[in-house]
Image (cartoon, rainbow, N blue to C red):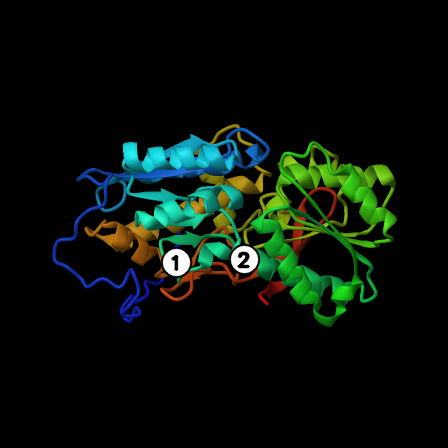
Amino acid sequence: MAIEVTRRQTLGLASGALLATPAIARAQQAPGVTQGEILLGQTMPYSGPASSYAPIGRTEAAYMDFVNAQGGVNGRKIKLLSLDDGYSPPKTVELTRQLVESDRVAAIYQPLGTPTSVGTRRYLNQRKVPQIFVASGATLFGDRERFPWTIGWQVSYQIEGRVYARYILDTKPDARIGVITQNDDSGRDFLKGFRDGLGERVKQIVLTQSYEVSDPTIDQQINNLHQAGADTLFSSGIPRFTALGLRAVTSLGWKPLYVIASVGSSVASAILPVGPEHAVGLISGAYMKDPSDPQWRDDPGYQEWLAFMRKYRPGTELTDINNVYGYCAAQTLIPVLKQCGEDLSRENIMRQATSLDIQLPMFQNGIRFTTTPTDYYGIKKLRLQRFDGKAWVSFGSPIGV
């Protein structure tokens, strides 16, 4: 498990900050922590419109088995209660309350989704329960001033949007741009970053459309963008809507410069259902090593991931980036718990989650996960990638804007 970790000093927190508690000799352990176990909770869409993300939760659970087989962390085994919320915010609220009040977990770890995690953020912060490494890149999960008990995991959607805007301007300076986003905080973040990246050339956006995750299709929105004369398309959303958009674009015979957000770029769930031949030339971003990209075949980090998958997730689709995501997110958790030592109070769990500097084996070279008490955004760069008909192939250097 070759994770390079640099432990950050956590002294110097603002004196008025919620988490700046003085060191104590014998910390009060969090609920769910015993001499032999650390109990964590999670909500994940094992059903519903975002169920293509289900491999994330399954891989994280498998990684806990892997760690436990080696003796756990500091002598304690990790138990992860991963519950199906169907990507439904009311269900997420119900299950999160159950995990905190009935199951008495030490922390909520890697709950997936922007709308779902927003629905529980205030509750968890009021109860001072760590909501660590939310599976979202929405900037609101880095709001340490108002919600110091919540921290996201992914690259900021605004950073990602800016990167794509710059690419379009560099590649097609006179582009007539159409944009389609999910109608929630994640979509608004992508749109803001994209517009910011365009700067004074934001007027090149000819039309913006949105959709609800409950929509059966986005054919009308795609047709509207086509009719508006767009020759460039930026699309953000979960894999299901990447597939729906790609299918609609193909049916129109439309061939725009087509850029999609990384959250919807899974080959297994977004491209293969439509046909990889229809996705040739798609542009997206990556901070992880995509398992479909042949350039990583001899990479030690890829080989390590592959061995883990074959032993702990046999029969799983190996081209699905979500299996890499779950693996990397799980590897981010382990240093947090190790750094806690014998102080597994909720305060210290949160303190260590915001004191990381890690090079993960399946992260793109030159991209680290770094947090501090004043910076809750762990991933700050990504590389561009292009689909060649078989795989995503990364190009250029890591970019952060």
Mark 2 crowdedness (10 Å alpha carbons): few <14, some 14-19, many ≥20: many
Give the SS element for disc 1. strand
Which label sits in the foreground, 1 or 2? 2
Q: Which residue is label 1 attached to?
A: 4
Q: Return the mark for residue 157.
A: none
> Does label 1 or label 2 sit earlier along the sequence?
1
Give the left or right position of residue 106, taking residue 139 as reference. left
> What residue is drawn where x is 84% and y is 54%?
231
Depth check: 308 or 263 in front?
Answer: 263
* Coordinates of residue 137 in the picture (x, y in percent): 53, 53
Give the left or right position of residue 23, taking residue 202 as reference. left
* Gap between marks 1 and 2 measured at Cα: 23 Å
> What residue is drawn where x is 71% and y is 42%?
390
Q: Is residue 171 above or below residue 287?
A: below
* Marks 1 & 2, CB-CB < 8 Å contact: no
Give the SS element for disc 2. loop
Depth check: 210 or 309 in front?
Answer: 210
Query: Label 2 sits on what residue type?
Result: Ser
Q: Return the mark for residue 156.
A: 2
For residue 35, say whether it is visible: yes
Give the left or right position of residue 371, taking residue 46 as reference. left
For residue 309, say whether it is visible: no
* Coordinates of residue 308 in the picture (x, y in percent): 44, 38
Depth check: 354 or 127 in front?
Answer: 127
Q: Is residue 282 above or below residue 36?
A: below
> What residue is drawn where x is 82% and y is 39%?
250
Residue 66 quadrant: top left
Residue 78 quadrant: top left
Mark 1 crowdedness (10 Å alpha carbons): few <14, some 14-19, many ≥20: few
* Residue at the outermost left position: 25
* Coordinates of residue 149 in the picture (x, y in percent): 35, 53
